[in-house]
Image (cartoon, helix red, strand yellow):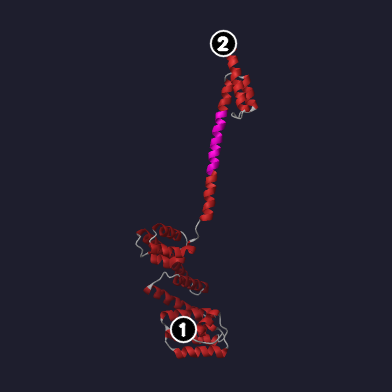
């Protein structure tokens, strides 16, 4: 009997202590939990303590989880604010990195270019092939090789389709557009460039002979022939353009370029006089050419 009284007395003391701790805010138990602690000796207080420990553990986990989330959000936010521009905005940094031997910067930029659009950075990639860093050289060669393969596959497909339907003008236009892009990006050098320029000029001639060519096709053909040194073909096309489009500046500007290649100053002066007499409207580019060669047309 005495043992039971002692146990009950201890139970009351324990419950009072727990109640005081709850009032003081040290324990976060609920009223229901406290009621169970009073009604169930020994196990009631133990359960209350277990629940308190578990709730504290959950708070720590939630606190850490929330902190981690804030850290992640902070990293994302900082990455949005601090993320450097796209590779096209960093062409100059790439050239500078190659010059100052900044290994980390140039490798990072090379990887961005490889996973971006290498067609926009062909000149930088060609320069990078001569770099001292073997990894940079590998990236550059790989990017240029893959780019070359991409164009080869496109031309193979177009050639196959043109062989099947040679009369289809849309395929000719597609091939001309692809060649123009291929030559324009600067991927070709030396004899390979000359071969493709010859092909481009030949297809332009085919386009013109179809009878549906516009002024732009003639001007492209003249430019191609002048670049190839085919001056007789270029001059013949210029004459056609001047006869068919006498009020357009394109033919006159090509004729100035033709006489420039021939180092014929008298011919240039003759073209400038023609522009003045015929009152040809000049674009900003045309006015710049005329001013360069000493004309007075504005």
Gap in angstroms between the C-alphas marked 1 and 2: 119 Å
Badge 1 vs badge 2, beta-carbon distance below 8 Å: no
- Asked where in the image residue 163 lies, by quadrant, the reply is bottom left
Tell me residue 120's x, y (percent). 47, 66
Residue 58 in the magenta stretch? The answer is yes
Considering the image in quadrants, where does the N terminus appear? top right
Residue identified by numbered label 2: 3
Quadrant in which residue 103 is drawn: bottom left
Tell me, yes or no, if residue 220 can be seen here.
Answer: yes
Q: Is residue 277 above or below residue 125?
A: below
Residue 11 in picture, x, y percent from top left: 59, 18
SS at circle 1: helix
Question: Which residue: 52% across, 43% down?
Answer: 68
- Span colored in magenta: 52-68
> Residue 54, how many percent across, how many down?
55, 30
Residue plotted at (54% across, 40% down): 65
Name the N-terminal-most of marks 1 and 2.
2
Q: Position of residue 298 (x, y in %)?
A: 56, 84
């Amino acid at each position: 009997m005495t043992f039971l009284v002692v146990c009950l007395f201890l139970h009351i003391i324990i419950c009072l202590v727990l109640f005081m701790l709850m009032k003081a805010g040290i324990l976060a138990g609920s009223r229901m939990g406290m009621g169970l602690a009073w009604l169930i000796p020994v196990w009631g207080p133990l359960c209350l303590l277990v629940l308190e420990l578990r709730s504290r553990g959950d708070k720590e986990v939630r606190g850490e989880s929330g902190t981690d989330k804030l850290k992640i959000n902070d990293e994302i936010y900082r990455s949005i604010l601090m993320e450097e521009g796209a590779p096209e905005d960093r062409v100059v940094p790439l050239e500078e990195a190659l010059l100052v031997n900044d290994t980390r910067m140039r490798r990072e930029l090379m990887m961005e270019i490889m996973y971006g659009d290498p067609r926009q950075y062909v000149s930088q990639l060609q320069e990078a092939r001569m770099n001292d860093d073997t990894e940079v050289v590998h990236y550059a060669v790989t990017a240029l090789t893959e780019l070359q393969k991409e164009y080869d596959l496109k031309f193979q497909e177009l050639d196959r389709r043109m062989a099947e339907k040679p009369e289809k003008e849309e395929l000719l236009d597609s091939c001309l557009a692809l060649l123009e892009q291929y030559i324009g990006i600067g991927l070709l050098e030396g004899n390979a460039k000359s071969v493709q320029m010859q092909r481009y000029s030949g297809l332009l001639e085919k386009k013109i002979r179809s009878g549906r060519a516009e002024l732009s096709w003639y001007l492209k053909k003249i430019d191609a022939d002048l670049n190839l040194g085919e001056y007789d073909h270029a001059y013949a096309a210029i004459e056609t353009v001047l006869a068919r489009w006498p009020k357009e500046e394109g033919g006159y500007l090509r004729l100035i370029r033709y006489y420039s290649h021939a180092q014929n100053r008298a011919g240039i002066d003759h073209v400038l006089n023609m522009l003045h007499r015929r009152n040809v409207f000049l674009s900003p580019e045309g006015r710049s050419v005329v001013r360069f060669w000493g004309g007075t047309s504005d």
